[in-house]
Image: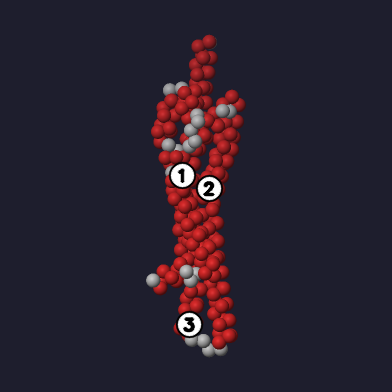
Amino acid sequence: MYYLDLLFVKGGTIGILIWLLSFVSMALIVRSFLRIRRKWLFPRDVHENVKSLFADKKYAQALKSAEGREDFFSMLLCSTFSRAGGGRRDMEKKLLDTAQHQVSELLRSIEWLNLIGNVAPMLGLLGTVWGMIGAFFQIVAAGSPDPRLLAGDIGVALVTTMLGLVVAIPSLCVYAAMRNRIEGITNDAVLTVDELIAGAHQAKRRTNKSSTMEEK
């Protein structure tokens, strides 16, 4: 009971703020693990279906199958091939612009974890400094206070630092993991769409070359 009272009550107002941050952090962590997955960003079934249709030169059907989907790969594909009439360079520029925008959105969705991971230990340090100031004022007021009482006050002050670190460490770890996951999955999707662009243009050149030879 003493430790529960120490952790949940004696942290003071700053301790309460850190606990509130911990709940927000947990919600963001769960949301990140649910949202930032290959299943939702770069679905294997969509990729295989589009790849197969492109191999059969059924470009319109492939784009139609991806149209309206909200995963990263489908939005990237549809946005890029909407510029098919402008040539390969225009498509590649659109690919990079769309990828940059979508990746920025994904990174912004986890940026709060980074913020909490940096703010929580600062709040903990603030609580510790505040507690130490109170302990020193107690020394000034009492002259020779009970060492046990003084140690207790200092211990309570250090609780806020511990709480700040408990919140910050998982927040920063998950932020780094999610950032790496975003970069890995989105890079795979961008490379795949770029390969589809190259394949479509190569097929078009072969078709044009065959048509020219037949005319001759």
Residue type, label 2: Ser
Q: Can residue 193 be seen by looking at this rendering?
A: no
Q: Estimate the x, y position of residue 136 in percent, counting from the top left.
A: 56, 81
Between discs 1 and 2, the one toward the N terminus: 1
Crowding at dot 1, Cα within 10 Å, few <14 / some 14-19 / many 20+, comes out as: some
Residue type, label 3: Leu
Q: Nearer the viewer, mark 3 or mark 2?
A: 3
Q: Residue furthest bottom?
A: 144
Could you tell me which residue is drawn at 55 percent across and 65 percent down?
122
- Is 167 or 38 nearer to us in this picture? 167
- Residue that badge 2 annotates: 109
Q: Estimate the x, y position of residue 42 in percent, counting from the top left.
A: 45, 38
Between discs 3 and 1, the one toward the N terminus: 1
Q: Nearer the viewer, mark 3 or mark 1?
A: 3
Could you tell me which residue is drawn at 57 percent across and 73 percent down?
130
For residue 35, the mark is: 1
Q: CA distance from mark 3 to mark 2?
A: 45 Å
**Disc 1, SS:** helix
For residue 149, the mark is: 3
Q: Is there CB contact under 8 Å for labels 3 and 1?
A: no
Q: Estimate the x, y position of residue 183 in percent, counting from the top left.
A: 49, 46
Between discs 3 and 2, the one toward the N terminus: 2
